[in-house]
Image: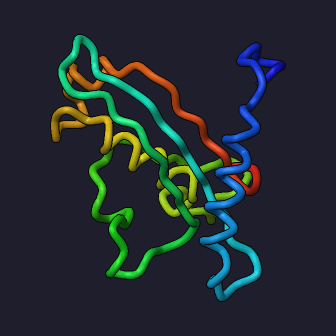
Amino acid sequence: FERMRLGKVPLDFLERAALRIGEASRNVSTYFEVYAYAEYDVLHLPGVADPIAGSLLGQSGWRETGSTWTPTAAKNWLRAFRLPNSGHIKRELCAEFQVLQQLCELFAISDDPSARAQLDVVGVVLLYTTTSPC
């Protein structure tokens, strides 16, 4: 953050991220899971919709049918591409990709990912991952 001149990461954000991830990882059956936690506070310009704020938690891997969100249920707001160093990773299943995809859905005014209105979202998104993003 500081090298990019974005300031310091808010300590209270890191504490909330650690708490949510700790709660989610209590019942995990494997020893290594990747989590992504995001907080957002945005509004649509010029006053198209009410401001929205909240948080999301994502976990790497495929979700069971009972989950509220799965990669196949999402619209294609983002496009995953194959990384040159590892073609075996399905990026749509990465925790941070899933959280960013959910954020796009939350911020959308239209069901059409190419709609012009999508460009008029202003605010702050903080994203924390438990390991370097895939």
Left or right of residue 23: residue 51: left
> Where in the figure is residue 8, as x and y percent of width and height?
78, 25
**In this view, 52 is above or below 2:** below
Outermost residue toward the right in this view: 3
Residue drawn at x 20%, y 32% is: 109
Regarding residue 134, the answer to whether it shows in the image is no
Residue drawn at x 44%, y 31% is: 41
Residue drawn at x 44%, y 44% is: 54
**In this view, 122 is above or below 76:** above
Taking depth in this image into account, of 44 and 120 the one nearest to the observer is 44
> Where in the figure is residue 131, as x and y percent of width and height?
76, 55
Outermost residue toward the front in this view: 12
Residue drawn at x 32%, y 35% is: 107
> Where in the figure is residue 67, as x and y percent of width and height?
36, 74
* Quadrant in the rendering for residue 121: top left
> Where in the figure is residue 60, as x and y percent of width and height?
58, 66
* Quadrant in the rendering for residue 51: top left
Regarding residue 8, the answer to whether it shows in the image is yes
**In this view, 113 is above or below 47:** below
